[in-house]
Image: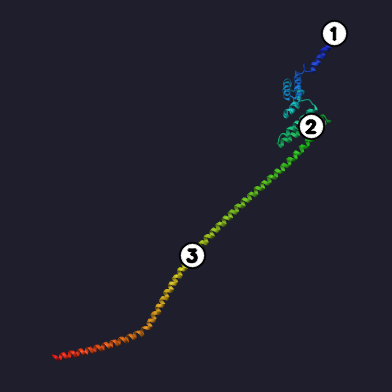
Amino acid sequence: MKIISIISGILIVALMVLFFTGVISFDGGVNEFIIMGNRAYAANNYEQAVQTYQKGLEKNSEEPRLNYNLGQASYNLSNYNEAINYYSKSSGKVDKYINSGNSSVRLAESIDDAVQKQQLYQQALETYKQGILAFPQNVPLKYNYEYVKSKLDNQQNNNEEQGENQENNEEQENNQNQQDNNSEQNQQNEDSSENEQNKDSGQQDSEENQQSSQEENNNDQDKEGSHQNETQEEKEDSEEQNASQMQESDSSDPEQNDSNIAQILKMLEKQEQESLKNNQEVKKSTKEDEYDW
């Protein structure tokens, strides 16, 4: 009996040693993968650790230790989305809340979209809050909570300022567009006014040209009329002069006629006397001839 008791004690101790070392497991063989994954994790070979832990999940996907270890390895590889997913299925350790919240913060800092950034900060705050409720004395959880809360407040203020700036920019842009439209309208009005002025000026020039042409025609007509008047006046003057000359000739003719008549009469009288004398002589000669007969 004593020998049997000693052998039984040795077997129990051996089984316990094998169990704690991972050689023997009563949970479907996941301890083997946990031990192998932990060795890779301790050597900072996080990718190998992830692969080993994932093989263990193929046997038991809800095993808390495997999910927690996968969360830790994924966090060190900066695979924050996967880390958050694994932490949500892990056992309730304080590092679960700290690193899960930190993963949300890292994701928020890696994107530019303001809405998604704000959502991830709120997710981190909720994770820290759950950790504080589970571990109220943990200082890192409280510190991270206050830190992220201040960043979220700043983010909200920045969003409000950006919204106001965007509204101001839109208002300024609208005002600028309105000013541009007004300036363009004023330019069009100026162009239209200038065209009207040019049109009026052209019409005025045309009227002035017509007036100038009319004045030139009038001047030509005046010159022609003046020339005609001068010609008519010269003609009238010539006629008056001729008439005056004629009148003068007429007034001088009686004297000249009287003188001429007197001369003619004298000449006629002289001729008549000579003729009479000649006639007398002829008659005398004829009478003598008659006597000869």
Q: Earlier in the sequence, mark 1 or mark 3?
A: 1
Task: Nearest to the eye among marks 1 and 2: give it.
Answer: 1
Looking at this rendering, what residue extends furthest in the right direction? 2
Q: Which mark is residue 3?
A: 1
Residue drawn at x 37%, y 82% as measured from the top left = 250
Q: Which of the image's four quarters has the N terminus? A: top right
Residue drawn at x 80%, y 30% as measured from the top left = 131
Identity, as a three-letter code, of the amino acid under mark 2? Tyr
Q: Nearer the viewer, residue 237 or 44?
A: 44
Q: Earlier in the sequence, mark 1 or mark 2?
A: 1
Find residue 219 and report its horizontal and vertical position in percent.
48, 67
> Badge 1: how crowded within 10 Å, few (<14), some, or many (20+)?
few
Task: Nearest to the eye among marks 1 and 3: give it.
Answer: 3
Q: Quadrant of residue 74?
A: top right
Residue drawn at x 23%, y 90% as measured from the top left = 277
Q: Which mark is residue 216?
A: 3
138 left or right of 119? right
Q: Which mark is residue 128?
A: 2
Looking at this rendering, what residue extends furthest in the left direction? 293
Find residue 151 and report its horizontal and vertical position in percent.
77, 37
